[in-house]
Amino acid sequence: MTYTRLPLPGSAPVDRLQFNAALYHHVFGTPASADTLVLGKDFSPLAEYTLLASQSGALAAALVHYGDGSPGHVYLRVGREWQRVLGTEAKVMSDKTAWDGEQLLVVSHQDAPRGKLLGIDASGKSRVLVPEQDWAMNAVAPIKGGYLVAEVSGPDWRVRHYGADGRALRTVALPAGIGIASLAGSGASPQALIGYSGWSIPPRWTRYDGASGTVVTEFETKAAADYSRVRSYRLNARSVDGTSVPVTVLALAGVTPDGSRPAILTAYGGFDLPQAPRFLGIWLAWLERGGVFALANIRGGSEYGEGWHEGGMLGHKQHVFDDFHAAALSLVSAHWTDSAHLGIEGGSNGGLLMGAALTQHPQDYRAVVSSVGIYDMLRSQLWPNGEYNISEFGTVKNAADFAWLAAYSPLLHVRQGAAYPAVLLITGENDPRVAPWQSRKFAAALQASGSPRPILLLTRRNEGHGVTSSFSQRVGNSGVMLAFFAQQLALPSAAPAGRP
């Protein structure tokens, strides 16, 4: 058995125990003290591993990346020996890989911003199986006689079936307006599973038959309310540099732009993570009161491929904030809302986005909810997990990087006497990813600015970054957020007369 091991307690300072991970091999029936180091010696302290075993177990792959959102090195293991077969120049992301028998499938972005599908054999040789397409490749799974590839173009998603010769056979018949969550298949079977959800569709799994092209729902989560009246609309915002940014607007059937609807805009913009249509869940309550919810597919994610990601990272991070501001202005120009009724929401890297948005354009937003955000970019790196973000943001130890970090770091740009939106910051006392002092410092600076609107800080004692929050914690945070927005944006307590 091969596994990832971190330094043992006592072998390194407590704040360094999350670094220097390596692969060890364990022989069943022997003590753990006899385990041997097989991969990771002299690697970067930031090394993180994704392990994948072939279906027979004869081969294994390790994708090793140094920093969140960064491409990985690809290693193959034959027997007990590991061999690097692709370096970071291949631009392979660990979540875009799968085994097809004894062939490793990877999506490479080298000379292919939207991705190309490679097959790597047991000797380490690679070849192109499916060349770059007009949509960006996001996930792959084998199917008998070919491959299934999840593809994305802005807010739109699809699954395409390719033959072994790389020729597109069909686009799988799935509902419009969904996001693909996962693919599962085997090169020995003509059938595969596709997981997806949509704005009004809770998560479900469907079985796709590659021979007939039919799709059958195998499992679906039942919604606890009626989402059939949710409607989506598309806007195209124009960013500062002329880039077109798609914005999806959601409202109930019959709700039309009146120029002042309470609206909430969200986005993420980082780490190669695309923002897909997802089940609305709690936001239905907002829509039922005549409110509007919107999602912007800004740069920093992979909605159009790796080029879209690179356009919003490192020295290009300001593009992310410009895209978001353009999305907000598009809601106003389309008369869905106005600045007096526009709220914005985001978390983590999306919390950084919220901090930049409210300090760069405070007059264009009425309320902000930001969860576990990064606001002091010059000191984020000093928090242990901050080192894993250097690949995305840059480092304060480099003069050029320092300059762009200082140029947008929200904490540095809080101004005395500015009229900021009402702000609710939420953080977890036990957050290992983003230090809670980030929220505390930002809240204190905003409160000291003299802004006339409320600046609130909610610290959850038994929470972390939110990834593993309990159901009750999620409900609590959602309730606080919705109540805050409802009060600040003047959401009607009931659907207005004559309106849905």
Image (tube, rainbow, N blue to C red):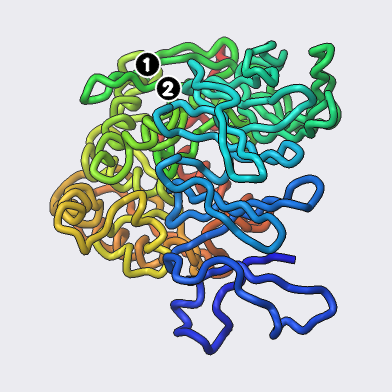
Q: Which mark is residue 247?
A: 2
* Residue closer to the observer: 445 or 129: 129
The C terminus: image quadrant: top right
Give the x, y percent position of residue 99.
Answer: 70, 40
Q: Vertically, is 333 above or below 265? A: above
* Residue closer to the observer: 175 or 170: 170
Q: Which mark is residue 417?
A: none
Residue at left offset 69%, top offset 11%: 169
Residue contact at pointers 2 and 1, CB within 8 angstroms? yes
Q: Vertically, is 269 above or below 495? A: below
Give the x, y percent position of residue 10.
Answer: 53, 89
Q: Vertically, is 334 above or below 361? A: above
Residue at left offset 43%, top offset 13%: 257
Kind of residue sitting beneath label 1: Asn
Kind of residue sitting beneath label 2: Val
Instruction: Report how many numbered discs are placed on residues in the image.
Output: 2
Give the x, y percent position of residue 332.
Answer: 32, 20
Q: Vertically, is 254 above or below 370? A: above
Residue identified by numbered label 1: 236
Quarter holding residue 4: bottom right
